[in-house]
Amino acid sequence: MSRNAKIVIAVVLIVIVVVVLCCTLGGKKEDTNTTNETSVNNIAEENIVEENEVGTNTIENEVENEVDEEPIIENVTELEPQGSVYETNSDIGTTDKKQQAINLVKEKWGEDDTVTFRCDSVNSKGEYVIAVVSKETATVKNYFKVNLNTKLVEIDY
């Protein structure tokens, strides 16, 4: 092929590509405008329909409140918690009981100005868990379980 033929073919191809691009982009603009106009028309029609529906709707459903004056309850039995320490012994966990447990631990621990004693909890058996806390480092040195009924103090790490 001659050099002139190659140039002519290249120019023709470029022209074809430009024409195709113009047609596709120009067609899309028209389609987009048509689509936008259609969308606007649809939205306007929906608004008109909604306005008409709202304007002509009336309240057709009336709610009747019927209240039974005496509710019927069948097969109801009262449930009582079983084995709950807090329900059966109302004085467990009181400040006086906590202080009694702390005093028993103080007796077991001995005189010591470097620690404090605090009641951390009462377990399900009614035993008080007392912590011996270092004043200097604020760390727990030991835990004790205290049963006030038997006055038994056990080390509980």
Image (tube, grey):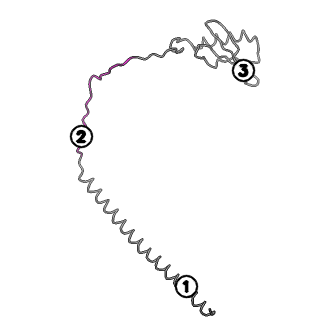
Report the residue that reaches farthest toward the front.
Answer: 1
- The amino acid marked with disc number 3 is Val
Q: Nearer the viewer, residue 102 or 74?
A: 74
Q: Of helix, strand and loop, which mostly describes the magenta segment?
A: loop
Tell me which residue sits at (55%, 85%) in the image.
Answer: 13
Disc 3 residue crowd, few under 14, some 14–19, many 20+, Cα 10 Å: some
Magenta part of the chain: 59-77
Q: Is residue 110 left or right of residue 69?
A: right
**Horizontal and vertical percent position of residue 10:** 58, 87
Which image quadrant for residue 45?
bottom left
Question: Tag 2 or tag 1, which sits nearer the N-term?
Answer: 1
Q: Give the left or right position of residue 154, taking residue 32 as reference.
A: right
| Residue matched to label 1 | 13
Residue 134 forms part of the magenta stretch = no
Residue linked to disc 3? 133
Local SS, label 3? strand
Q: Please tell me in which quadrant of the rendered image residue 63 appears.
A: top left
Q: Quadrant of the N terminus?
A: bottom right
What amino acid does circle 2 point to?
Answer: Glu
Q: Which residue is tagged 2?
A: 62
Name which quarter of the figure residue 93 lies in.
top right
